[in-house]
Amino acid sequence: MAADSLNALTQQVLWGVFICSIAFGFAAQRSHFCTMGAVSDAFNLSDWTRMHMWAAAAAVAMLGFAGLTYVGWIDASKALYVSSRVLWLSALIGGLLFGFGMVLASGCANKTLLRISSGSLKSLIVFVVMGVAAFATLKGVTAVLRVHTVDLVSVMAPMPSPSVRLVLSLVIGFVLLAWAMRNPVMRQLSMWLPSVVIGGSVVAVWYLSGRWGYVQEHPQTLQEAFLATNSGRMESLSFVAPIAYVLDWLMFFSDASKVLTLGMVSVFGVVVGGFFEAKLSRSFRWEGFGSIEDVANHLVGAVLMGVGGVVAMGCTVGQGLSGVSTLAMGSFVAVLGIMSGAVMAFKYQMWRLDCL
């Protein structure tokens, strides 16, 4: 493939992901889709509606990924999260840190982008601090700690055959969908449609990365390549590491080696989509910190999300939707860690209120 054709294909992938991310951001903003909010509603109010929304979105992503694999458009084994070596301790510890941090910071990485798009200056600070912490955990001081501790602990798990993967995806996906639709509220168009758009966006990005942007033999390396990815593997939506790469791109913009990637444009797309919805619904308003403790909580939460999101290899969207859609064992461990960390943070907040 000629260089011009390769560049044109890369641009097509990036524009496609940008459009999908706008749809994701708009739907998430309109429906108040938030994993932290879902756990909070279930834990504090016994209201499982947003958890059902998350389950429906995960089911759509899972069934869509299975469909792409079944028709041969993508190879599941090439996905970022799929590996026979499961870093279960990294997924668990990273998930716990991220889950605890997202409560302190008033939302996960995805919610941070949506809150920025609706005028939250608090979330803008969280964005920057989380990105710095994430980059340090990718390539800096915390990366050294990560590589020499939790990343050393793993188990080997057999890779399921395509037929077994398909059956498991169908069973788990339809069970999640059935559980979500037991809630009468979820049968309303305003509830299930955003879940379909959110889960469908994850599937669409899998297709763009794994099918549209797949090159069997890159002219420079003579090896297969997935264009516009940071990992060199097939990717879908995730927001912690991409936020770090966005900051790196902005700070070293004049460096020709710093180019936009799939994850980076998805960050911009979610903000744009969320902004459109906030303006349309007239919910845009400027928001700042309320107290010194509020500042401290958001700074600590941002650091925990940045470190935890990289250690766990994803956030509530990266592992919770994209990773889970592949049936990767580590993704389920990470989701368990995230939700457990969130519950621990809620209990901490209740303890703090009792101490006042």
Image (spheres, grey):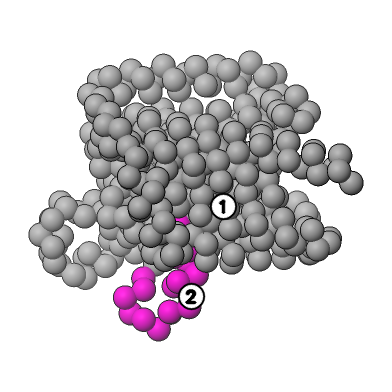
Q: Which residue is mark 2?
A: 250
Magenta segment boundaries in residue numbering: 241-259
As drawn, the label of residue 122 is: none
| Amino acid on which the number 2 mark rests in the picture | Leu
The residue closer to the viewer here, 164 or 5, is 164
Residue 229 in magenta stretch:
no
Query: Mark 1 and mark 2: span between their CA atoms?
Result: 21 Å
Q: Position of residue 164 (x, y in %)?
A: 28, 19
354 lies above or below 302:
above
Sequence-wise, the earlier of marks 1 and 2 is: 2
Nearer the observer: mark 1 or 2; the answer is 1
Q: Position of residue 252 (x, y in %)?
A: 43, 79
The residue closer to the viewer here, 293 or 211, is 293
Camera sees residue 162: no
Camera sees residue 99: yes
217 lies above or below 141:
above
Q: Tell me what residue is drawn at x 56 percent, y 46 percent.
A: 97
Drawn side of residue 230 relative to residue 22, left or right? left
Q: Which residue is mark 1?
A: 305
| Amino acid on which the number 1 mark rests in the picture | Met
